Image (cartoon, helix red, strand yellow):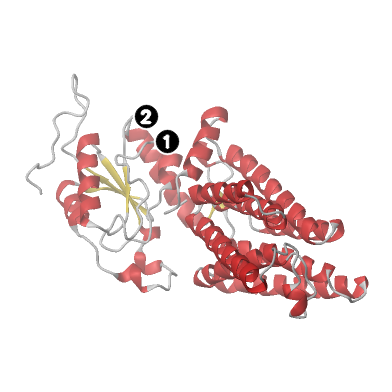
Amino acid sequence: MAIYGPGGYYLFGGIFLLFGASVIVARILTGLIMAGAALMIYLVTRRLSNSAYGLAAYLAAIIWFGNQPLNARTIAPALLLSFAFLLSGVGTFERPTPRGFFTLGIWSGLILVFRHDLGLDALFASLVVLVWRDFRIRSEGGGARPRASLFKEAGLFLSGAMIIALLIVMGSALYVYAVYRLDLEHIIPTYLISLILLAALAASSPLPRWRVFFAAFIVLCVSWTAVLKVQTLVSPREPALMELQIPRGRGIKVPPDWGKSLEDAVRYIDEHTTSDERIFVACPRHDQILLNDAMFYFLAGRLPGTRFHELVRGIATQEDVQRQIIEDLVRSRVRYVIVSSLTEIGESKEKNRRRLEPGSHLLDTFLEMHFRPDMDFGSYKILKNAAVETRAGDRFGPIPFDHGFF
């Protein structure tokens, strides 16, 4: 859920509060959300073509979701809301009303709560289509033609030009994002929108239906083969995975070396801290950050000692933010800091140069001054502030940090 809106945290946090914090609960909720997204894809496709093509798009979406689980990720509810936005757009652009456009704005806002990238793409696509629609009305000097033949004039034999234009603009914007982050999760929105466009094209084609279905089948096979090739290139074959054997890790499978280190680190924190004691999950360095292992908080069942529980470059690399983190750690009397070498910036596959921009060394200096190595579990290292010790009458004792640090 890194760097996205708070919707994912509130959604899954609320579900955990009602049904208990477990991976199974998150997976059931994600499954229901994905089923809803597939249903929305069917409804949008059916409105632009017919039930047969809608069913084909629905099945293709289900196959994709099964191959690329999106458990407890913000992309899942964002996709559901995005296709609800498109379904609402079909009716709005067919029969434009102020209420319909207001509803589109509501859907866009809800998407933004979960994923600002998808939400902004929806807003951008809506703006482009509305400007284009206004231009068409002014240039023709007459009423709007909701089911204009713009694409038929271009030789594509499509109707419902407004919603088609919305799909093309939104899909194109998401394609740029997919190129930047080349993996299945980031290709998914563009792929699903392409399915809908393919169905609309096929339904309006003058060719015999069997030829259309055959052509669509070939396109899907080729695209699926290309996607699997991308997955092979981006994620080389990994060794057999192990399932975590810690209470909150049941059902989570990770590489064996990582899993053993993670289990040992979680057990150590569980044995050496109380259930209401706060910890801090740090990066190897904080002037250049990829991310921190925020999942550790959940697996250990411990709250973070700062509101900046998820460290993201461009935010946690700033001096004023690091100053706030230090103040939070002092206020929370954090004794243990967990550092994961898996979040080393050198291991990043990110191609943008911003990841290498220098940030503040303030937090690194603070941790070096006040924490010492306590345990080394390979991929996870435990740092301890030995000055904060439990004692009768004052569980944490006096705050040991040097207030003259700043």
Residues at marks 1 and 2, CA–CA distance in whole angstroms? 7 Å
Q: Residue at x 34, y 60 (%)?
A: 313
Left or right: 212 as drawn, with respect to 154: right
Whether pointer 1 and pointer 2 mark residues with C-beta atoms closer than 8 Å, the reply is yes
Image quadrant where residue 334 sits: top left
Q: Which residue is mark 2?
A: 275
Answer yes or no: is residue 73 visible: no
Is 256 located above or below residue 234 in the figure? Answer: above
Residue 402 placement (x, y as % from top left): 9, 42
- In the rendered view, would you say 393 is above or below 24? above
Q: Indicate which disc residue 34 carries.
A: none
The extreme bottom residue here reads 155
As drawn, the label of residue 301 is 1
Assign a secondary structure to mark 2.
loop
Which amino acid, by three-letter code, is at mark 2? Ser
**Callout 1 secondary element:** loop
Q: Amino acid at mark 1?
A: Gly
Give the residue at x 40% y 72%.
352
**To which quarter of the image does residue 228 belong?**
bottom right
Q: Toward the viewer: 18 or 113?
A: 113
Task: Tell me what residue is drawn at x 19 percent, y 20 percent.
Answer: 392
Image position of 39 (left or right of 387): right
Q: Is residue 211 visible?
A: yes
Q: Is residue 35 above or below residue 359?
A: above
